[in-house]
Amino acid sequence: MARTATYDRDTALDAAMQLFWVKGYHATSMKDLEAVLHMRPGSIYAAFHSKEALFRAALDRYATRMAGDMQALIDNSPSPLAALQSQLLSLADLTPCDRPSTACMLVKSLLDVPDEGDLRRFITDHLDRIERLIGGALQKARDRGELEADCDTGRLARRVQTYIFGLKVQAQRERDPQRMQDLCADLADELGRIAA
């Protein structure tokens, strides 16, 4: 008779995600994971197979939530371009709240792993997914006449993604809320000025 899992996978993944987000992949030890997951090493390996597999599952969870939130914002906005401007403006209040960091877990992870290898490709695949989502919104904006017909939406998507991740990094160092609001507003306005 097979043993049933005595842990909640979603709860475990959320706890692992928070830990990896704070400490990074390499600095997170199995002892750290045991403590936050409330699981013994054998149970962790039985549930997730390896530290790397657990990290991948946690990062996938983070990236899926990020993409889902952005897609919902785009879907629920009357304008794809306005949705991206709203995304930029929303980053003005990046107090950690229930998050361990305002910085993006994808970016922090990218900086934590070697320049080559499957793990780096896994992270960059998620970053590419976000870029495609932004690019899709910009293509819709172009199709609706919000952007010039010859607008290079791929290039603009990379720029907007840089704004988003850059603002998340800036929020780590900025202590003056007004300066953060001004910066977000400046970048949102810049994006608006690109409109046809």
Image: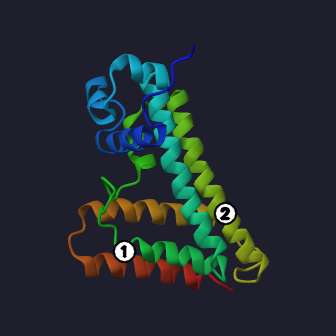
Within 10 Å of disc 2 (Cα), the crowding (few <14, some 14-19, many 20+) is many
Q: Amino acid at mark 2?
A: Gly
Number of labelled discs? Answer: 2
- In the rendered image, residue 161, in percent from the top left (x then y), is placed at 53, 61
The residues bearing labels 2 and 1 have C-alpha atoms spaced at a distance of 22 Å
Please tell me which residue lies in front, 11 or 71: 11
Q: Residue furthest top?
A: 1
Look at discs 2 and 1 and give the one toward the viewer.
1
- In the rendered image, residue 86, in percent from the top left (x then y), is placed at 51, 78
Do callouts 2 and 1 mark residues in contact (Cβ within 8 Å)?
Answer: no
The numbered mark at residue 53 is none
| Residue displayed at 36% across by 42% down | 15
First in sequence, mark 2 or 1: give its number: 1
- Left/right placement of residue 140 relative to residue 115 reads right
Residue tagged 2:
135
Q: Is residue 106 above or below residue 116?
A: below
| Residue displayed at 52% across by 40% down | 123
- Name the image quarter holding the N terminus: top right
- Name the image quarter holding the C terminus: bottom right
- Left/right placement of residue 35 relative to residue 93 reads left
The numbered mark at residue 92 is 1
Q: Is any atom of residue 3 visible in this view? A: yes
Question: Tag 2's secondary structure?
Answer: helix
| Residue displayed at 24% across by 68% down | 174
Q: Is residue 180 above or below residue 156?
A: below
Please tell me which residue lies in front, 84 or 160: 84
Q: Is any atom of residue 159 visible in this view? A: no
